[in-house]
Amino acid sequence: MKKILTLILACLCALAFWGCKGSKPTLHIYVWSDYIAPESIEQFEEKFNCRVIVDTFDKNEALYAKIKGGAVGYDVLQPSSYMAKVMFDEKMIIPLDKSKLPNLKYVNPKYLKDSAIDKEMLYSVPYMICYACVAYDSNKVKDIPQSWSVFADSRFKGRMTLLDDIHETIGAALKYNGFELNSVDDAELAKAKETILNWRKNVAKFDAEAYKTGIATGEFVLVHGYSGDLAQVIAEKPHIKLMFPKEGMSISCDDWVIPQGAKNLDLAYEFINFMTSPEVAVQNMEFSQYDAVNWKARELMSDELKNMPTMNIPAEVLEKSEVIKDLGENNKKRYKLWDEVKL
Ligand code: N2P
């Protein structure tokens, strides 16, 4: 009996030893969907002998609520810049040690100077720029204006979607009315509400994820969506076209940040640095069709990507487009409006 017990103990010790030897550090990241090339994740895992677990979200508010609600265990997050600021102000993410991020030298300095919210990259590293625009099925949708007013067109009733995103859809309605994207003026917001209620009569739903499959399969004929995601669809289905409303669009950037309490800090820095290397950044541009905030990666783009409409937005539309900002206390006005207009 004693011998058997000794044998079992020896086996358990051996198993524990091999288990430890075989276990790899695991990096948990929480990011937007369809945004990171699977091969980048594989290359990172191989280079750093680790595993990466990728969880995805489709709204900044979902990310914020999850982390604020106490979700622990993530090492890297990917909020849009205005949400990164909120999270930093609320001490949900940490200031970055830039000595661990040598690839920051590739981040486009013009973007930092002109458009970034965190100009010094104190707590965030920019990843990709995104515009919210419109995609339509050119076989079924003809003669549309280059304007947000297309959502008022009852010809497409029930076959259009608007983004399920407070700042995007309120922003589009404000721009349509000639106001600033980040306006918190009561009269202007009231006008935007009236516009959304008018558009709402014609849209099937507010949606931030299914619109991609919806426009690709013909379920919807016209959708409000994120530029790169829409470009992913048109790369496969050339009859889907993009429309950049003449009144201007929203511009947002999604950033890498590290949450308070991240368990794998060194690996988190390695991951952000890896994703900011030009070769990996361009791999992700080609995959996601978004525009990386990386001057060197932009030089490495394929001709095919260079020619995509999302890389050639008309200058007059860009001039009227604005970066989404954090509105502080005034966000409450928008949450109230959003509750009143949501289907
Ligand atoms: C990625 C969507 C990111 C756009 N699929 C929102 N900023």
Image (cartoon, grey):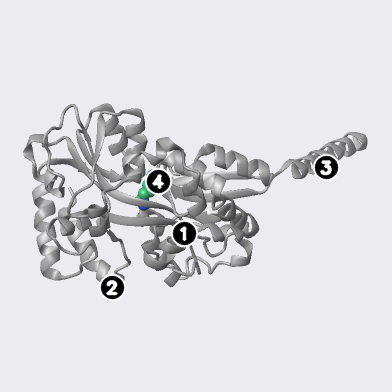
Q: Quadrant of residue 208?
A: top left
Q: Going 29% across and 47% down the picture, which residue do you hit?
A: 313
Some atom of ligand 1 lies within 8 Å of the CB belonging to the residue at label 4: yes
Q: Going 28% across and 73% down the picture, which residue do you hit?
A: 329
Q: Quadrant of residue 171?
A: bottom left
Label 2: which secondary element: helix
Q: Gap between marks 1 and 3, in whole Å?
A: 53 Å
Residue on which disc 4 sits: 290
Residue on which disc 2 sits: 329
- Residue type indicated by callout 3: Cys
Quick one: label 2 or label 1, which is nearer the N terminus?
A: 1
Looking at the rendered image, the disc whose residue lies closer to the viewer, 1 or 3, is 1
Mark carried by residue 292? none
Pinpoint residue 103: horizontal percent, then vertical percent. Answer: 58, 57
Pinpoint residue 202: horizontal percent, then vertical percent. Answer: 11, 41
- Residue type indicated by callout 2: Glu
Residue on which disc 1 sits: 108
User: In this orientation, does residue 90 appear?
Assistant: no
Label 1: which secondary element: loop
Residue on which disc 3 sits: 13
Q: Tell me whether circle 4 and circle 3 mark residues in contact (CB < 8 Å).
A: no
